[in-house]
Amino acid sequence: MKRVITYGTYDLLHYGHINLLRRAKALGDYLIVALSSDEFNWNEKHKKTYFTYEQRKQLLESIRYVDLVIPEESWQQKRSDIHEYHIDTFVMGDDWKGKFDFLKEEGAEVVYLPRTPEISSSKMKHDLYDAASIEESKTNHDDLNTDPGNV
């Protein structure tokens, strides 16, 4: 059985994540997703997630390509995960290209998959923030133009 592992936060799950997971699973028989814990996201990645670890884990477990979800609690655990879970292939998005080549020394093939270019969690957050700002500006503008005598 060929085992594949990938890592990520998987907050605001979208079709780009699904594409990555589908392509990662296609590289083997068993896909493990190491999901960044809330503490790791906050303390090491300096990210606040919208969904909690448990909520994100539940979402990932419902995806047919994912066989197992484990917590990612440190940058260093990748080496030990390769051995503990008998990993054949380590997969990440190509925005990390070259960063994990050292895992080849642990006996794993390292594959960087192209991202789905038109979508990302960061883009979604940005677009939602912009939409909220426009709506707030519009509401404030409407409030200024309301004649209190007509209310």
Image (cartoon, rainbow, N blue to C red):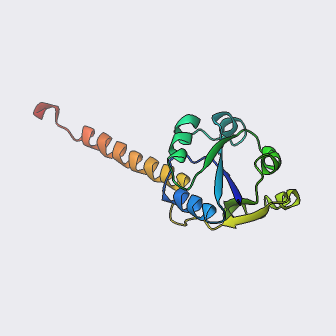
Position of the N terminus, as image quadrant, is: bottom right
Quick check: can you spot residue 52? no
In the image, what residue occupies the spot 48% across and 58% down?
Answer: 15
Q: Where is residue 134 in the image (x, y as percent from the top left)?
A: 37, 49
Of residues 8 and 136, the one nearer the viewer is 8
9 relative to 87 in the view: left or right:
left
Q: Residue furthest left?
A: 150
Position of the C terminus, as image quadrant, is: top left
20 relative to 149 in the view: left or right:
right
Look at the picture and state if 110 lies above or below 54: below
Of residues 133 and 69, the one nearer the viewer is 69
User: Which image quadrant is residue 69 in?
Assistant: top right
Of residues 139 and 7, the one nearer the viewer is 7
Q: Residue furthest right?
A: 105
Of residues 126 and 144, the one nearer the viewer is 126
In the image, what residue occupies the spot 32% across and 40% down?
Answer: 140
Q: Where is residue 133 in the image (x, y as percent from the top left)?
A: 41, 46
Q: Where is residue 50 in the image (x, y as percent from the top left)?
A: 52, 39
Look at the picture and state if 59 lies above or below 52: below
In the image, what residue occupies the spot 59% across and 65% down?
Answer: 23
Q: Residue furthest front?
A: 1
